[in-house]
Image: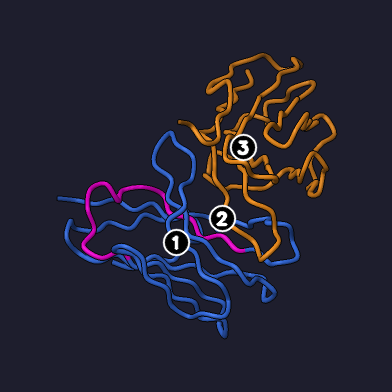
Amino acid sequence: DTAVSQTPKYLVTQMGNDKSIKCEQNLGHDTMYWYKQDSKKFLKIMFSYNNKELIINETVPNRFSPKSPDKAHLNLHINSLELGDSAVYFCASSQGASGGPRELFFGEGSRLTVL
Amino acid sequence: GESVGLHLPTLSVQEGDNSIINCAYSNSASDYFIWYKQESGKGPQFIIDIRSNMDKRQGQRVTVLLNKTVKHLSLQIAATQPGDSAVYFCAETSTDSWGKLQFGAGTQVVVTP
């Protein structure tokens, strides 16, 4: 059973296109995240949702729009893709912060290549 | 072997030896720290965590040490095995930051026979 699953695993597209990555977690967690990992393996948070509410929105171009239809799903839509958007995007989830922060559970990643 | 995880350095360790991976964190308000392991083509996997009210925590073959005075974290892996080859990340967060984990740059560990 995959705890955090994201699709697609690989995505190759042209500059200027719009694409989406989907994420689902079956852990019953109430908080979900999107992280971006660049070519140097640096992981940086982009967004976080708690019970469908946006709680973290880092300095990310507004071409990136997350959407959480319910607490088990967090999708990422990217408009007008640019070369610099090429990266691996990781979805993650965690249990709520009451009682202190908890570890994040990560998906396998979605490798986006913009040509 | 020993390394500082700032620019994705590589730590080469002989199978059976102990590994030490170091991490300097930046935020003095951070009160929760995690070590993650990332194998090639996979997502980061939780190894061990520690809260700021502790200075040492042990797991199976792993030990995390926390020195809040100098804002330093280390991960010790005992009897390193080939399956330990991966990139290791330290991450920090604070209770009031909604689990926003800030990751270090990572250290590549290569286990040689």
Magenta part of the protein: which range? Answer: B77-92
Same chain for marks 2 and 3?
Answer: yes
Spatial CA span between label 1 and label 2: 9 Å
Q: Nearer the viewer, mark 2 or mark 3?
A: 2
CB-based contact (under 8 Å), mark 1 and mark 2: no
Q: Residue furthest bottom?
A: B69
**Closer to the N terminus: mark 2 or mark 3?**
3
Q: Nearer the viewer, residue A71 or A40?
A: A71
Above or below B73: residue A85: above
Graded by Cα atoms within 10 Å as few (under 14), some (14 to 19) or many (20 or more), the crowding at tag 2 reads many
SS under mark 2 = loop
Residue hosting label 1 = B48
CB-based contact (under 8 Å), mark 1 and mark 3: no
Graded by Cα atoms within 10 Å as few (under 14), some (14 to 19) or many (20 or more), the crowding at tag 1 reads many
Indicate the colour of chain A.
orange
Spatial CA span between label 1 and label 3: 20 Å
Residue hosting label 2 = A103
Q: Which residue is painted at 55% across and 58% down in the image?
A: B104
Q: Which residue is painted at 43% across and 68% down in the image?
A: B22
SS under mark 3 = strand
Residue hosting label 3 = A91
Kind of residue at disc 2: Glu
Instruction: Assign the N terminus of chain B to one quadrant of the image.
Output: bottom left
Above or below A76: residue B49: below
